Image (spheres, rainbow, N blue to C red):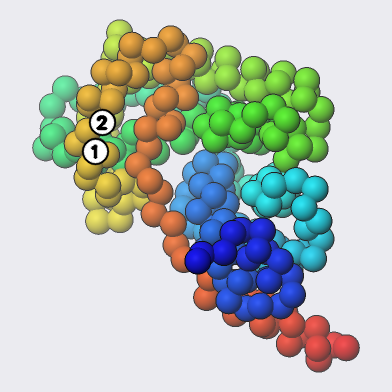
């Protein structure tokens, strides 16, 4: 019989290496998903995810079961992400105004890549993740937790260590900015807008924002093929719901397996601690 997560945590706290590896495998996808949405670039997300997972396993003794284990992990992840160095995309200082201008430039009515659904998926995911970067980190993480991951106010406030009313205000400000931007600029959320993922492809390839040989987000063909039908349903929703539905329509992110790397780092830390002692 497969053991429950609390049982696995208990064994890991007792020093069981197999249980420790199982915990890493269990939470790595959630941690990576938050990191990717916060930082945009997969390589930055991988770097910070490895650091967060190492913190999780080295601080396991501090988990007392006062909250769900997943909430405790999110709290460690969010605290680390909010204080982490600026990612390569954050360094660009993206704003809704600048992003909106960019969406208006270089739209093509034809081109050799127009029918490539995978490249359109790459544009779609990268562009919508880029919208999140227009929010400051505090509002970005509130939107990710409350809207995309659907944590309730109690859970999200607990993760962020703020009051529920403070979290709700943060979430509402983030939501209103995202919705307003998509309504005014995004052709997916509002069919009257000229911007389309396929129309952005030629310029994106030209500017090396999309590399056909090294895609950052796309690759799940089923998601790419079914998205037009999903989009039809999304456009039937209320405006506020359309925005978050687009984020939830992303393909499953390809999560690297961090188990070996975190285990190796943990062993190195223990050896260093033993030698220094």
Q: What residue is shown at x 19% (from left), y 36% (from top)?
A: 225
Q: Which residue is most to the right?
A: 277
| Quarter location, residue 230 | top left
**With 239 as the anchor, is 146 left or right in this view?**
right
**Residue bearing the label numbered 1:** 224
Q: What residue is shown at x 47% (from left), y 34% (from top)?
A: 130
Q: Is residue 27 above or below residue 201?
A: below
Q: Which residue is most to the bottom?
A: 275
Q: Nearer the viewer, residue 159 or 34?
A: 159
Please state the horizontal and vertical placement of residue 25, each as a whole percent of the image: 52, 63
**Contact (Cβ within 8 Å) of mark 1 with mark 2:** yes
Please state the horizontal and vertical placement of residue 44, each as a whole percent of the image: 53, 55
SS for tag 1? Answer: helix
The dot on residue 75 is none
Number of other residues with Cα within 10 Å of mark 2, as a class: few under 14, some 14 to 19, many 20 or more: some
Please state the horizontal and vertical placement of residue 23, each as a whole percent of the image: 59, 64
- Residue 206 visible? The answer is no
Please state the horizontal and vertical placement of residue 22, each as a whole percent of the image: 55, 67
**With 159 as the anchor, is 113 left or right in this view?**
left
Q: Which residue is most to the front?
A: 1
- Residue 246 visible? The answer is yes
Q: Quadrant of the C terminus?
A: bottom right
Q: What residue is shown at x 52% (from left), y 75% (from top)?
A: 260
SS for tag 2? Answer: helix
Q: Is residue 55 above or below residue 242?
A: below
**Residue bearing the label numbered 2:** 227
Tell me the distance, in whole angstroms, between the alpha carbons under discs 1 and 2: 5 Å
Number of other residues with Cα within 10 Å of mark 1, as a class: few under 14, some 14 to 19, many 20 or more: many
Q: Nearer the viewer, residue 234 or 269?
A: 234
Q: What residue is shown at x 42% (from left), y 25% (from top)?
A: 245
**With 49 as the anchor, is 60 left or right in this view?**
right
Q: Is residue 255 above or below residue 163?
A: below
């Amino acid at each position: 019989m497969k053991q429950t997560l609390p049982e696995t945590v208990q064994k890991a706290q007792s020093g069981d290496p197999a249980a420790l590896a199982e915990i890493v495998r269990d939470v790595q996808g959630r941690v990576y998903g938050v990191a990717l949405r916060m930082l945009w670039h997969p390589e930055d997300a991988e770097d910070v995810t490895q650091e967060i997972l190492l913190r999780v396993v080295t601080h396991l003794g501090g988990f007392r079961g006062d909250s769900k284990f997943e909430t405790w992990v999110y709290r460690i992840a969010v605290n680390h992400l909010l204080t982490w160095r600026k990612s390569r995309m954050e360094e660009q200082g993206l704003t809704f105004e600048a992003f909106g201008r960019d969406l208006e430039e270089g739209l093509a009515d034809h081109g050799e890549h127009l029918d490539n659904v995978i490249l359109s998926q790459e544009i779609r995911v990268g562009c919508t993740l880029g919208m999140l970067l227009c929010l400051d980190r505090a509002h970005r993480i509130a939107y990710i937790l409350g809207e995309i991951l659907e944590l309730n106010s109690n859970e999200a406030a607990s993760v962020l260590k703020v009051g529920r009313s403070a979290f709700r205000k943060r979430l509402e400000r983030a939501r209103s900015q995202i919705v307003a931007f998509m309504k005014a600029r995004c052709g997916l959320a509002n069919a009257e807008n000229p911007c389309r993922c396929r129309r952005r492809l030629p310029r994106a390839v030209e500017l090396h924002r999309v590399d056909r040989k090294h895609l950052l987000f796309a690759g799940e063909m089923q998601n790419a093929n079914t998205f037009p039908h999903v989009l039809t349903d999304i456009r039937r929703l209320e405006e506020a719901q359309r925005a978050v539905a687009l984020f939830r329509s992303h393909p499953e992110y390809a999560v690297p397996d961090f188990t070996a790397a975190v285990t190796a780092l943990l062993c190195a830390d223990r050896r260093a601690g033993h030698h220094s002692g």
